[in-house]
Image (tube, coloured by chain):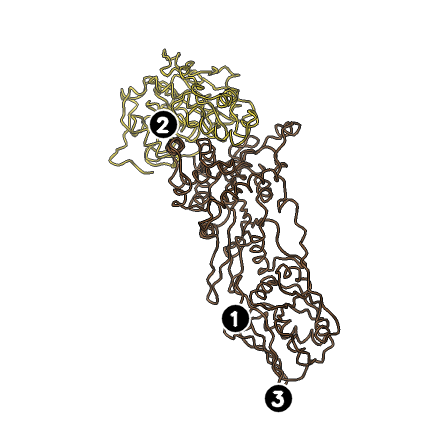
Amino acid sequence: MKMLSGEKVNRIDIKSSEYPSLLKEIKDPPPFLYFRGEWDINIFNETLSVVGSRRMTGYGEIITDEVISAVAEAGITVVSGFMYGIDAKAHEAAVEAGGRTVAVMPCGIERIHPEHQAPLYEKILTTGGLAVSEYPGSTPPALWTYPRRNRIIAALSPFLLVVEAGLKSGALITARIAAKYRRNIFAVPGPLTSSVSLGTALLIKQGAVILTAPEDILNKYGKYSLTSAGNKKPWEGLNKNQKRIVDLLSVSPVGIDEIKRNTGRSASETGADVTILQLYKTIILKNGKYYLNKRGDKC
Amino acid sequence: MLIRVTSVSFSGLNTIRIDVEVNIADRGLPSFDIVGMPNKAVAESRERVRTSLINSGTNFPLRKITVNLAPGDVPKEGAFYDLPIAVGILSGIRGFSIPGESMFFGELSLDGSLRHTKGTLLAALFAKENRIKNIFVPEQSANEASVVKGINVYPVTDLNQITDFFNSEIKLEPAVYRQSEASGRGGAEFDMSEVHGQEQAKRALEIAAAGGHNIIMIGSPGSGKTMLARALPGIMPLLSEEESLEVTKIYSSSGNIPPGGSLIAARPFRAPHHIISQAGLVGGGAHPQPGEISLAHRGILFLDEFNEFPRAVIEALRQPIEDGMLTISRSLERVTYPSRFILVAAANPCPCGYLNDETKECTCTKREIIRYQKKLSGPILDRIDLHVDVPVVDIKKLSRGLDNTIKNESSPEIRTRITAARKIQKERFKSEAIHTNSEMKNRLIKKYVPLGPSSRSLLLEAAGSFKLSARSYLKIIKIARTIADLEEQTDINESHIAEALQFRPRIIE
């Protein structure tokens, strides 16, 4: 609930010219939009809304990171709900890529929820982003404020990206609202063995666009990727054994024991190679599995 | 008529001589008293001695009997004064003399027979140190005492036998040490080859055993943490004779040696439940008894559900882990028990246990996970060198592995490497007071683990990249030293450092 020092809460009236036009279009726009940060209406010029599960998997994390980094670098504002999981990862990736991002809060504007993400909250504001809410004061979030918040997320962008979603999830609710608002929906495909990929699979079945690369989104905005992902070959400067690990991980991410079994080398040698690859930032450890780091510039 | 019999008193693992003086006076009202700071168990000796003498067919004298346990200012504890007191009285009424250089030790049963008594080994060691040639102990404890060479250990079944012996009616043969059946697995419940998958965890245990490093395993329920821990004694080097005696002393003093048992040959494996009290873990009591950490001396202390242990109990582990011993101070006495063990901790990754699990969904909220992992961190984790994830092994992949021709290494094979690595360490630290790499402090790390420029720069790069603390940095060096020892290499190269980095702490991500 803490306020940043010397900072005021402001609000934008729906009658103001500064009010985001996309939000005005819907049937029940909030009469006032409370916000923290420096209000700049240009932030809403090009926006992508992102939603996803709180129970983010390593896969979801990697994909969010990859897609959002490219999107943010292209100057597109990332709008999300500041919940932990995919939301937080999307904000974080946007900030790290030097982009701006808007956090739509489910609670009163003076409250940071969830509290343990306060450092991220501050980062969003200090990098030119915004926190917005339709509720003043420090009202705590309630069950009903989440879907209300989701309509704002859906409304603020012409496109909605759903990364991971369960069959019963806020992300699916947001997608339904977005469809009602005639927004285009991108869904990230995932393994059907994962419960948080069943929701996105359902969206795809119902006609959402399957996202296979960040360019799918960028093209819609008339942009192209600034980071040429194919530029840096992940296996440059690696020895034969390390290349084998890279080959293995390019098929699917696995844990270290499986790397050992598949490469047929000792646990000791595998451990050493994996550490070196991690230091080269060729691979990343997420939730107990190693993934190829396609972006190659952060750990 | 005054008779003097030699016995012993314990203070922890230390012994002092006690003279049991029995006086049977012709004057005064019939009575039977014990003086000399006896505690409850000693005072009750009166009833046991009187009854067992009567039940052995002795006419208990209706005279004033005074027993003095000298010196009088040392508190006496234990039931083993029964035998010296009874022998003193018997000598008085049956008129036999007690040969010099003899001592007596044992608890009586009411029928006059002797019961297995705790502390017998310590008593026998005391006898040897004090050049007492003969020690009379209960038959069931004789094998325990007979470990001590150079003294005569006489096994005694009952009071009549000892009377007959002193009246030269029968002969008693000193006990000959019989080795108790050592388990072929060196105390391990499983062989490492029975554990399928978990190659990384097995490797971590190998390093732990080789360098005496403490280790924490993080994994979901059913991933095999307990099985791995229980296989660990089997890859540790066998107890040396000296170590075995150290362990047996602790077990003897706390009554943990079964009747007829003797030297403990297998590495101790202690797995206390998390409801244990602080005194139960580190030892305590008015007459301090050894706790689980001392019973785990030279072996393994396995704390499953590590984060469920009360903080105070865990914090009490810090000192013994640093020093390899713990001094327990009470108003009556101060006792030091050794406690050089490998701590093997195991914990779930989150409150529900299924974080990152492929087979089952984690139901915890982020906040719960953060709180849980915070609890798992803290000063004690600083004393744990190796951190390893133990993921659930996919049963389908596992069964594929079973048909595979790849054979898992057996515990004895791994033990060979570890024994060699231990030998290298012993040689390295011969002029220091330590035996293993894990015991090295900063000064010794600088002295014994010089890093080449390439190893150092790799480590520095990793320290930045993985955000290692200064303490973790030193731990990595110690682990790398052990890895190099396992390969019998003098110098630490980059791959040693790189492998060591796999075991860095990464609970909070």
Q: Secondary structure at mark 1?
A: loop
> Chain for mark 3?
B
Q: Are marks 1 and 3 in contact (CB under 8 Å)?
A: no
User: Which amino acid type corresponds to the residue marked 2 in the rendered image?
Assistant: Ala
Q: Which residue is mark 1?
A: B75
Residue B465 appearing in the image:
no
Residue at figure coordinates x 48%, y 67% from the top left: B332
> Chain for mark 1?
B
Counting residues from the N terminus, which is met first, the one under dot 1 or under dot 3?
3
How many marks are shown on the rendered structure? 3
Q: Whole-Å distance between the Cαs marked 1 and 3?
A: 29 Å
Q: Which residue is mark 3?
A: B27
Q: Does residue B475 lie above or below B120 as drawn?
A: above
Colour chain A is painted in: yellow
Q: Secondary structure at mark 3?
A: loop
Residue A8 image-quadrant placement: top left
Residue B194, numbered circle: none
Q: Quadrant of the C terminus of chain B?
A: top left
Q: Quadrant of the N terminus of chain B?
A: bottom right
Disc number lying in front (1 or 2):
1
Q: Does residue A27 lie above or below B60 as drawn?
A: above
Chain in brown?
B
Q: Whole-Å distance between the Cαs marked 1 and 2?
A: 72 Å
Residue at figure coordinates x 63%, y 41% from the top left: B190
Q: Which residue is mark 2?
A: A103
B19 or B38, which is in the foreground?
B19
Q: Position of residue A81 (x, y in %)?
A: 40, 27
Residue B381 appearing in the image:
yes
> Chain for mark 2?
A
Q: Position of residue A86 (x, y in %)?
A: 43, 27
User: Which amino acid type corresponds to the residue marked 1 in the rendered image?
Assistant: Pro
Q: Whole-Å distance between the Cαs marked 2 and 3?
A: 100 Å
